Image (cartoon, rainbow, N blue to C red):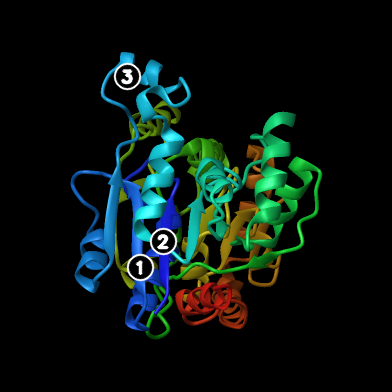
């Protein structure tokens, strides 16, 4: 029996796509007879998946992102202040689990470097899995050197897309040897979802409302053009409200757009894709979006921007459409081509399903579990 500790360095939202891989992998490992712990930020109300993990026998450890008051936050920056510095707390957590392997799940590559440093300083084997990257966030030279050292000492560096790996190597100016591409788990539609025969072309944006990342504002700017207002189209936005929702709704009202509907969070893939023809994903940065995989598996084509792993699945003009960059003009051009090809979208959706079935394993969490066990 092996002991594995998963650490999530993503602490800015209760649950996101980056949590699904380590959570499902933890369940796979527990069912294989291994002992698993998870260390993450404590959120209330508690995400449903955390309750499921606990019921499966996973040990859940929590931390708070913020210290109690400003004086404590200031003092905590002083190394080893009364033995309560953050590095000591990290090491204590890792040591108590007696883990054979620590898996650090992070957003941007290297964003969990403090955890990696704690492991490295004390000879504890570790891997990282990076779910995202951005052209707009680059490490300075001090951090780049630290990341090169820590990533080189990891047992393995996992990425969810090849393009994110290449971007990170460009950002630090170093080619890492021990890397591997891993895929995220997704909700598979059990059978082909019937195509909606409707003269109205229905776009769906699926994911959290976060325009600086997901680009909802770009889609609205395109739909503000008179030609789109005059067409029989609908844009349905799926995802729970966020701090950005009021501004997005004001933007829609400002432009006088009547074809947008906010659907809230919908858990069922079938419920989303029975009503829509094409995924609209004008992201500014990504990993390999789970919603893209789910849409393609449901035999729906997608309009994506050429960021991260999107073009590792979407082949322009064959199973979807690619905007070369996240700009209004280029997104409009890609959407225009989709509009002109609307009679072919059903066939393109079938091609999308074939592509994703060939590229994404049926159970990515089991694949990841096996990969981790090989390193112990």
Circle number at residue 132: none
Which residue is at the front of the view, 81 or 250?
81
Q: Nearer the viewer, residue 16 or 273?
A: 16
Which residue is rendered at x = 29% and y = 59% of the image?
266
Q: Residue at x 34, y 82 (%)?
A: 33
Q: Which callout, 3 or 2, points at the residue further toward the start of the chain?
A: 2
Quadrant position of residue 273: bottom left
Q: Residue tagged by mark 1?
A: 36
Tag 1–tag 2 contact (CB < 8 Å): yes
Q: Is residue 31 above or below residue 66?
A: below
Crowding around mark 3 (Cα neighbors within 10 Å: few <14, some 14 to 19, many 20+) is: few
Taking the spot 46% from the left edge, 62% from the top edge, the residue there is: 291
- Kindly tell me whether residue 173 is visible in this rendering: yes
Per the image, the residue denoted by label 3 is: 72
Residue 204's x, y, as percent?
Answer: 44, 57
The answer to which of 125 and 315 lies nearer the viewer is 125
Alpha carbon separation for disc pair 1 and 2: 6 Å
For the residues labelled 3 and 2, the Cα–Cα distance comes to: 28 Å
Residue visible at 55% across and 60% down in the picture: 125
Q: Which residue is mark 2?
A: 5
The image position of residue 131, as x and y in percent, is 54, 54
Q: Quadrant of residue 284?
A: top right
């Amino acid at each position: 029996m092996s002991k594995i500790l998963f650490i999530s360095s993503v602490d800015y939202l209760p649950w996101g796509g980056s949590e699904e891989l380590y959570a499902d992998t933890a369940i796979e490992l527990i069912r294989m007879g291994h002992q698993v712990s998870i260390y993450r930020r404590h959120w209330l109300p508690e995400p449903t998946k955390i309750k499921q993990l606990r019921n499966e026998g996973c040990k859940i450890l929590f931390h708070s992102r913020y210290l109690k008051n400003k004086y404590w936050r200031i003092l905590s920056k002083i190394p080893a202040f009364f033995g309560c510095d953050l590095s000591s707390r990290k090491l204590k957590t890792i040591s108590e689990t007696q883990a054979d392997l620590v898996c650090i799940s992070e957003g941007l590559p290297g964003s969990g470097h403090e955890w990696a440093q704690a492991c490295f300083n004390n000879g504890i084997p570790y891997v990282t899995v990076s779910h995202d990257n951005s052209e707009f966030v680059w490490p300075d030279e001090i951090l780049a050197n630290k990341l090169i050292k820590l990533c080189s000492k990891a047992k393995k560096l996992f990425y969810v897309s090849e393009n994110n790996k290449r971007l990170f190597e460009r950002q630090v100016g170093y080619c890492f040897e021990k890397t591997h591409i891993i895929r995220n788990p997704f909700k598979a539609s059990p059978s082909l979802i019937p195509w909606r025969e409707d003269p109205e072309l229905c776009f769906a944006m699926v994911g959290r409302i976060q325009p600086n990342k997901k680009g909802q504002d770009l889609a609205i700017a395109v739909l503000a053009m008179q030609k789109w207002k005059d067409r029989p189209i609908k844009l349905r936005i799926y995802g729970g409200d966020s701090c950005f929702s009021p501004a997005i709704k004001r933007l829609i009202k400002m432009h006088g757009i009547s074809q947008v509907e906010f659907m809230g969070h919908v858990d069922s893939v079938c419920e989303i894709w029975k009503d829509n023809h094409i995924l609209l994903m004008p992201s500014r940065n990504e990993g390999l979006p789970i919603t893209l995989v789910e849409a393609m598996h449901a035999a729906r084509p997608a309009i994506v921007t050429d960021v991260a792993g999107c073009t590792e699945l979407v082949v322009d003009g064959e199973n979807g459409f690619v905007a070369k960059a996240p700009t209004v003009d280029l997104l409009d051009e890609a959407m225009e081509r989709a509009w002109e090809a609307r009679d072919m979208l059903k066939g393109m959706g079938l091609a999308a399903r074939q592509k994703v079935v060939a590229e994404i394993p049926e159970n990515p969490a089991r694949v990841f579990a096996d990969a981790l066990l090989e390193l112990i």
